[in-house]
Image (cartoon, rainbow, N blue to C red):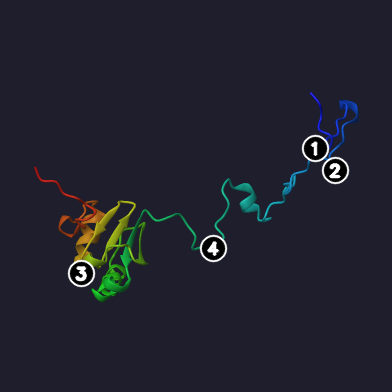
Amino acid sequence: MKAKENEKTFPESESPKPENPKPENPKPENPKPENPKPESTNSQSLNSQSPEPEDPSDGPEPEKTVWVCQYQSCDRSGSAEVLEAFRQAQLPPGTRVESSGCMGQCSSGPTVRVSPDRIWYCRVKPSDVEAIVEEHLERGKPIDRLLNPRIHLRFYY
């Protein structure tokens, strides 16, 4: 075969080299230091296996979290009073109460969700809080009459 007139052919020993050859052993862009210094020289943190929390209020995650929606339609339906009732209640150890943004159940608010149990309550009133605390949070039995039917489907046979 004939080579085109504009194309140059080179024997392997005389082939042109690229203009910017890559080095054989390139260095990583963000090398890690070989001996990183400890962040704290506190002897307690050096001797323990797990690092200390930075803030004393940082501790283990609670066992349960009660989320009370405070978004528009839930707020109009009285969710602020429900949240206050949970905050005033004697909660079991390891349980915390948090306000929440919209949970997508606007037509059935105030909405209360208990995690990690994956229980959703609807149309909760401040008078329902005592039953939720005693039956669900303390005894582990969700309140059937308050379960959100859009989430907790019931099948009757």
Q: In the structure shown, which secondary structural element does the residue marked by tag 3 occupy?
A: loop
Farthest residue to the top: give it. Answer: 1
**Vertical order, 45 against 3 (above or below):** below
> Which residue type does callout 1 highlight?
Asn
User: SS of the residue at dot 4?
Assistant: loop
The nearer-to-camera label among 2 and 3 is 2
As drawn, the label of residue 103 is none
Q: Which-is-in-front pick, marks 1 and 3?
A: 1
Q: Position of residue 140 (x, y in %)?
A: 24, 51
Q: Earlier in the sequence, mark 2 or mark 1?
A: 2
Amino acid at the residue labelled 3: Lys
Residue on which disc 3 sits: 125
Residue that badge 4 annotates = 55
Q: What x and y, as percent, mark residue 82?
A: 26, 70
Residue located beneath label 1 in the image: 25
Reading the chain from its start, which is encountered first: label 1 or label 3?
1
Q: Nearer the viewer, mark 2 or mark 4?
A: 2
Which numbered mark, 1 or 4, is in the foreground of this view? 1
Circle 2 is placed at which residue position? Answer: 19
